[in-house]
């Protein structure tokens, strides 16, 4: 299958998921995850009308997205991978949405960089719903206080929550937990669901799904 066909297939599955969940058409945004793919492999998706992309590494993104954004100014770029403090300035300069705010230190550094650069990417807090020691993210219990700290102490506007459920578990309960936390925190956006489980995530209220291999092929 060509990229365009795979992209259309994902789009129609998202639309079907919206209908099935009695959610408005267009309420779920597709974030096309282009990590590991070069600019030449990404351009066909842009040509097919895709505008929202996700990357997990700052440095890799710097090698391709400034050029692609210059070609197509309406690109919206999401950072979906872990962010180190020493990459915060570059991340604020390049990304439009940073989904992986996961500790106080990085929140403080981002607040400082945003002031310095006068650029304000939207921020999501990553939640470690499975309490996995190797995975980034705030614990569910600590999430409401962390969101409050970001908002009230650091003056950051937190737009959403993001999670990556444990690979070997049924993702449904993790999506449900993230949706519940978003209500508690008064946060509107829910980034959840990947190639294997985005239809489930839509049923649980995802406002964006991060789909890579189903569009670009195996990595
Ligand atoms: C790679 C990645 C995805 C996309 O995964 P696929 O299974 O290829 O759709 C989504 N979210 C995050 C955080 C990722 O790192």
Image (cartoon, rainbow, N blue to C red):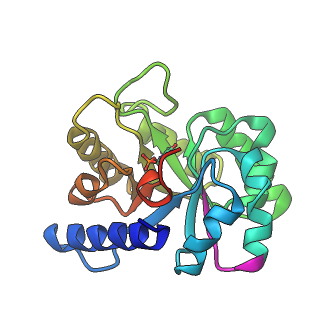
Q: Position of residue 168 (x, y in %)?
A: 29, 28
Q: Position of residue 190 (x, y in %)?
A: 38, 56
Residue at the location (46% across, 73% down)?
Answer: 4
The quarter of the displayed image where residue 73 is located: bottom right
Q: Position of residue 56 (x, y in %)?
A: 61, 45
Q: Nearer the viewer, residue 202 or 159?
A: 202
Magenta-highlighted residues? 71-78
The N terminus sits in image quarter: bottom left
Q: Is residue 93 above or below residue 14?
A: above
Q: Residue furthest top?
A: 133
Residue at the location (47% across, 33% down)?
Answer: 138
Q: Nearer the viewer, residue 1 or 68?
A: 1
Residue at the location (42% across, 33% down)?
Answer: 128
Q: Is residue 139 above or below residue 202?
A: above
Residue at the location (33% across, 69% down)?
Answer: 9
Examine the rendering and report whether any part of residue 76 can be seen. Answer: yes
Apparent side of residue 147 relative to residue 132 in the rendered image (left or right): right
């Amino acid at each position: 299958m060509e990229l365009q066909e795979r992209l259309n297939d994902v789009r129609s599955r998202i639309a079907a998921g919206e209908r099935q969940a009695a959610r408005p058409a267009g309420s779920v945004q597709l974030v096309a995850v282009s990590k590991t793919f070069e600019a030449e492999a990404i351009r066909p998706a842009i040509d097919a009308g895709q505008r929202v992309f996700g990357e997990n590494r700052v440095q890799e993104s710097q090698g391709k997205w400034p050029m692609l954004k210059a070609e197509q100014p309406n690109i919206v770029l999401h950072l979906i991978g872990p962010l180190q403090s020493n990459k915060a300035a570059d991340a604020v300069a390049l990304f439009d949405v940073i989904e992986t705010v996961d500790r106080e230190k990085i929140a403080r550094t981002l607040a400082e960089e945003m002031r310095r650069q006068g650029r304000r990417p939207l921020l999501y807090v990553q939640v470690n719903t499975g309490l996995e020691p190797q995975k980034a993210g705030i614990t569910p219990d600590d999430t409401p206080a962390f969101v409050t700290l970001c908002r009230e102490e650091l003056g950051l506007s937190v737009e959403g929550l993001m999670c990556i459920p444990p690979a070997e578990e049924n993702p449904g309960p993790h999506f449900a937990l993230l949706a519940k936390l978003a209500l508690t925190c008064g946060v509107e956006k829910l980034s959840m669901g990947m190639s294997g489980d985005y239809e489930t995530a839509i049923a649980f209220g995802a406002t964006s799904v991060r789909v890579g291999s189903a569009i670009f092929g195996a990595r």
